[in-house]
Image (cartoon, grey):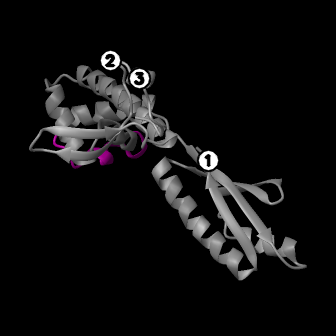
Amino acid sequence: MAPRWIKNIHEFISEGQRLVVKVHRLDREKNHVDVSLKRVSEEEKKNKLAQVSFEKRAKKLLEISIKGVKVKVDFEDVRNKIEEEYGDLYSCLKEASEQGEAALDGIDIPKGLKAQLVEVAKKNIKKQMVTVDGIATLICYGGDGVEAIKKVFSACRKDSEVTYLGAPKYKISIVSEDYKSGEKKLSSILEKLEGLAEKNNCSFSFEKSD
């Protein structure tokens, strides 16, 4: 529940409250699931809540799409077919808003519904960008410290930004379509920065923002 001993569990949870937790043990024989509240980071919590919100919105957009076609289709049947292909409704609608009906080629639903899904998706789902960032500490030794710093940060790509906060602190930011791809890009850059720092007689550390 918490990183410390607690007297009253109601300090942290109450009946009927919705929380983001992490499953860390599953006992199928006892039909028992162990979950943790304290093991969920703020970023994981934020991402999960956003995912739940997106899925609710996608469900509503699917209902609107079905109402807009003349052919009678079952909501759950369409939903299951979409989730078999994409895993969730929102991912499908997001792709449909960007790629059109080509994003629905692998889904066995009426053509009229595909056209309606694309129309509704394009009107209601805009491409969203997220920022993944953190604070880097870079200390370069020797008389050519400024040049060494420039060489280290040359590893940063066009889709990243380095902001000087005051020696030896620098903010590194990545703008991406989602957190997963943003974190992957950031990880790649950090690996290069660490290598260049070592090569140029510098010490490098990085602390990710919450």
Q: Earlier in the sequence, mark 1 or mark 2?
A: 2
Q: Is residue 111 left or right of residue 40?
A: left
Please state the horizontal and vertical placement of residue 67, each as a whole percent of the image: 24, 19
Q: Earlier in the sequence, mark 1 or mark 3?
A: 3
Crowding near pointer 2: few (<14 within 10 Å), some, many (20+)? few
Query: Which quadrant would residue 44 be assigned to in this image?
Result: top left
Please provide the residue range marked out in magenta.
Answer: 97-110
Residue position for label 1: 209
Circles 1 and 3: CB distance less than 8 Å?
A: no
Seen from the viewer's position, the closer of residues 158 and 190 is 190
Crowding near pointer 3: few (<14 within 10 Å), some, many (20+)? few
Instruction: Name which residue lies at 48% across and 42% down.
Output: 41
Q: Earlier in the sequence, mark 2 or mark 3?
A: 3
Please state the horizontal and vertical placement of residue 57, each as a whole percent of the image: 37, 26
Q: Nearer the viewer, mark 1 or mark 2?
A: 2
Instruction: Name which residue lies at 42% across and 32% down.
Output: 49
Q: Amino acid at mark 1?
A: Ser
Q: CA distance from mark 1 to mark 3?
A: 31 Å
Q: CA distance from mark 1 to mark 2?
A: 31 Å
Residue position for label 3: 8
Please state the horizontal and vertical placement of residue 117, each as a whole percent of the image: 31, 32
Picture layout, residue 155 above or below residue 43:
below
15 falls in the magenta region: no
Mark number, residue 188: none
Q: Nearer the viewer, mark 2 or mark 3?
A: 3
Query: Which quadrant would residue 120 be assigned to in this image?
Result: top left
- Quadrant location of the N terminus? top left
Seen from the viewer's position, the closer of residues 11 and 198 is 11
Seen from the viewer's position, the closer of residues 69 and 155 is 155
Query: Which quadrant would residue 147 be assigned to in this image?
Result: bottom right
Residue found at the very far bottom of the displayed protein: 199
